[in-house]
Image (cartoon, coloured by chain):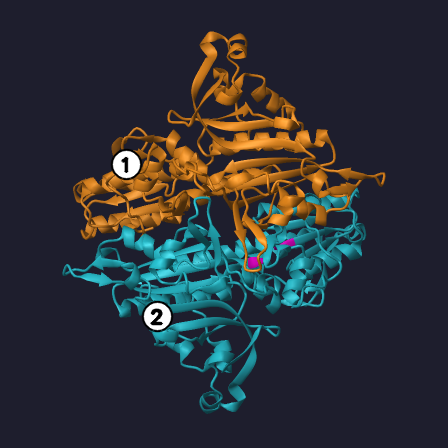
Chain colours: A orange, B cyan
Amino acid sequence: MHLTRYFLPVLRETPKEAEIISHQLMLRAAMIKQSSAGIYSWLPLGHKVLKKTEQIVREEQNRAGAVELLMPTIQSADLWRESKRYDAYGKEMLRIVDRHERDMLFGPTAEEVVTAIFRDSIKSYKELPKNLYNIQWKFRDEIRPRFGVMRGREFLMKDAYSFDLTKAGARAAYNRMFVAYLRTFARLGMKSIPMAADTGPIGGDLSHEFIILAETGESQVFCHADLIETPIPGPDTDFDGDLEPIVKAWTSMYAATEEMHEADRFAAEVPGDKQLSARGIEVGHIFYFGTKYSEPMGCRVQGPDGQMITLEMGSYGVGVSRLAGAIVEASHDEAGIIWPVPVAPFEVAIVNLKAGDKETDRACSDLYAKLTGAGIDVLYDDTDERAGAKFATMDLIGIPYQVIVGPKGLKAGEVEFKIRRGAERQSMPLDAVAGVVIERVVGERVLA
Amino acid sequence: MHLTRYFLPVLRETPKEAEIISHQLMLRAAMIKQSSAGIYSWLPLGHKVLKKTEQIVREEQNRAGAVELLMPTIQSADLWRESKRYDAYGKEMLRIVDRHERDMLFGPTAEEVVTAIFRDSIKSYKELPKNLYNIQWKFRDEIRPRFGVMRGREFLMKDAYSFDLTKAGARAAYNRMFVAYLRTFARLGMKSIPMAADTGPIGGDLSHEFIILAETGESQVFCHADLIETPIPGPDTDFDGDLEPIVKAWTSMYAATEEMHEADRFAAEVPGDKQLSARGIEVGHIFYFGTKYSEPMGCRVQGPDGQMITLEMGSYGVGVSRLAGAIVEASHDEAGIIWPVPVAPFEVAIVNLKAGDKETDRACSDLYAKLTGAGIDVLYDDTDERAGAKFATMDLIGIPYQVIVGPKGLKAGEVEFKIRRGAERQSMPLDAVAGVVIERVVGERVLA
């Protein structure tokens, strides 16, 4: 992409309304723009990050055997009356009356819709187990939306729903999502730690929040430091096999959010030098809820013996739009964002220090052609801005690798190669730089 | 994808509520499921078609220089008050009041939102021209939604908005979208014809509807038969160059929808043997509207001489979810849907006639591995359904190529290869079939 043809209205000043760093940087980097309270447009740069994030989430859901569909944003209130949640949900539900005076709502989640789809479609135990997911915009009418996309009203969520014949089956479905989530966040360049979450009236131990550690995180979390080093299951993990050992390895050590924290147990179970207390951001939540929806909504199939079986269900959420903010919280410096390659809006930037100069233009164009020809996602700054502003913009928007091309260097056949993380800069022969860049980018695309 | 792991609840009966063929077939093929009136879930099969359609629309927008962003579904009424459309829009607008009693709405279109983004972001003529587009769910509260996704309430639309300094610039922007649309629909396997549309108070000749010819189309259209044979601009079209000759070639011949049809002119301009009268489906609309929004909303930039310039705008819509229905209308037979390869939910089906039989299972698995290894999108029917039901399902869901593998054929080292269009079947050596399938599919992926 040529910058002159792109839409990147970066801000030099930090907008006053932004309290946290991800909100500030996402506004300044022209990733998002507020449309109304808690509702954002995703400008081209942010949109690319969102799409790449979504795609990684999708790939790991597919790997774990979940099947993608797409449910509508506007739902009928009648479905929510079946599950008895319509009145209970409160003011966070955006309630709507259509032109025929029918009660509708903008879905804050989709248990009811997916349970109705399953109930109306599947009649036999032979079709089980199944896990259906979608990546769709949701709305929760937060009383005080803030922190940009971290706590917006309209947000993109991946929500999966598993259907099983037995509790043991539901546990296996839960484990598949548990492992998929570990892989998903690792591929996004982040260290996530699953932490026991409240199961409310459902009971049991099948509810975990996935927490990203970040200095500016929203809440305090406590865990065994060794969790940081626990290995992520590889891409060859057998999702048809028994995943319980992996889940055990991650859940046998202490890990709790503030709400679930027990100081006594923490002190007793974790050696002093392993007691990690840090700030965290919730990016995912998995939850087994049994027959909570299938029972009142009549989601049953015929078993092998002809008896009707009420299905065991669980739900599994990832805040996709929130993740973009979480990555910024976890990966930035004073100059701006530092994108991990897998979600970088562009993998490489070419900075032309003298647009209009024949030699410089030609060197940049050749390099651009070479890199894009190799499938690299490149932003080429071909504007006539001054050098300082160009560097500031590239650092702000966080492109992982930058190649700086100017007439002086070119006379010696050299360009500058800059690694955004650490701000390391080195001279390099023009002939060599494409090879170096391609090798690095391709090597970092798949992190787990 | 193994069918045993997929979610494909096809219907053997045609649902009574479906009046037109695309609605019937999309329900029967388990592409969609109604959630409430005019609102559908896209089941896995339909979701794949929708995503492939969306991606082709996206690629052609990008090729034409448009830049993708994403605007929210929920918009503020205040923006629509600025353009004076809030009261004027009528009951098709889904109006919403949030918990703070603010007037909101589910966007039926996004001129106001994009104009506000542009106005707040771009200050100088140097940044022009620009074309911003998004692919997002819209809502129009139709009084009588029907025909499935062809006239739904919640629908997926690609909407692009161009910003130019001059009328001539706006015309060039219009031409780029005109050509992009010709390419888009051709790549989807359809013949589209641009037809002059009403420009209302704006006047001029810059408004065209793109119409797909289909026997079951919603309205009557009239055009010069030679338009059918007019060549589609190739992928190497220079979108920075003058596209007026291409647009001229397409607009100099008579083409009009029922509303714009002039029988006298048709008779005078088109020779009798070239007078084509057919049924058509509108799948796109491009429209130049000048300063209709930029003027009241104050969308201006500073020109080279310091004077403020009110921007010239146009908008360009494609009904993405409607397209899926339009393709079915244009491409089906008595047995079901016939997908063009570029949008087929799966490109190839492998039908195992005796799941559980060692030799047959192995032959199918090997073939599946070979095809997926070559990047082919394969649905493998590994169920224990009877053969007749398997054939009926594959024909119904319209997979373009089918490989039928049974123990009898395998004894002679043979499988059956079936082309969905025309229902041609032939025996073929098992060793040869992968090569044949791959060559055909790859060859048909890019139609224009």
Task: Tell me the residue at 26%/41% (across/down).
Answer: A393
Q: Is residue A261 magenta?
A: no
3D distance between C-alphas at marks 1 and 2: 40 Å
Q: Which mark is residue A121?
A: none
Q: Which residue is mark 2?
A: B243
Give the left or right position of residue A99, taking residue A52 as reference.
right
Comparing B27 with B6, the one in front is B27
* Pick the front one: B229 or B105: B105
Where does the image place residue A363, in percent across and percent down from the top left? 25, 48
Please tell me whether residue B350 is drawn above or below residue B185 in the rendered image. above
Q: Quadrant of residue B19?
A: bottom right
What's the residue type where badge 2 is placed?
Answer: Leu
**Residue A155 at what x, y percent from top left?**
47, 42
Q: Is residue B306 left or right of residue B219?
A: left
- In the image as oriented, which residue stretches furthest toward the left? B305
Query: Which corner quadrant of the image does residue A401 belong to?
Result: top left
Q: What secondary structure characterizes most of the magenta part?
A: loop
Q: Can residue A5 be seen from the camera position used here? A: no
Any part of residue B275 in sight: yes
- Where are the magenta residues, as a range? B343-348
- Residue that numbered label 1 is attached to: A417
The quarter of the picture where residue B240 lies is: bottom left
Image vertical order of residue B335 relative to residue A40, above or below: below
Tell me if mark 2 has few (under 14), some (14-19) or many (20+) residues whose alpha carbon lies within 10 angstroms of its own: many
Q: Position of residue A328 (x, y in %)?
A: 38, 34
Q: Chain of mark 2?
A: B
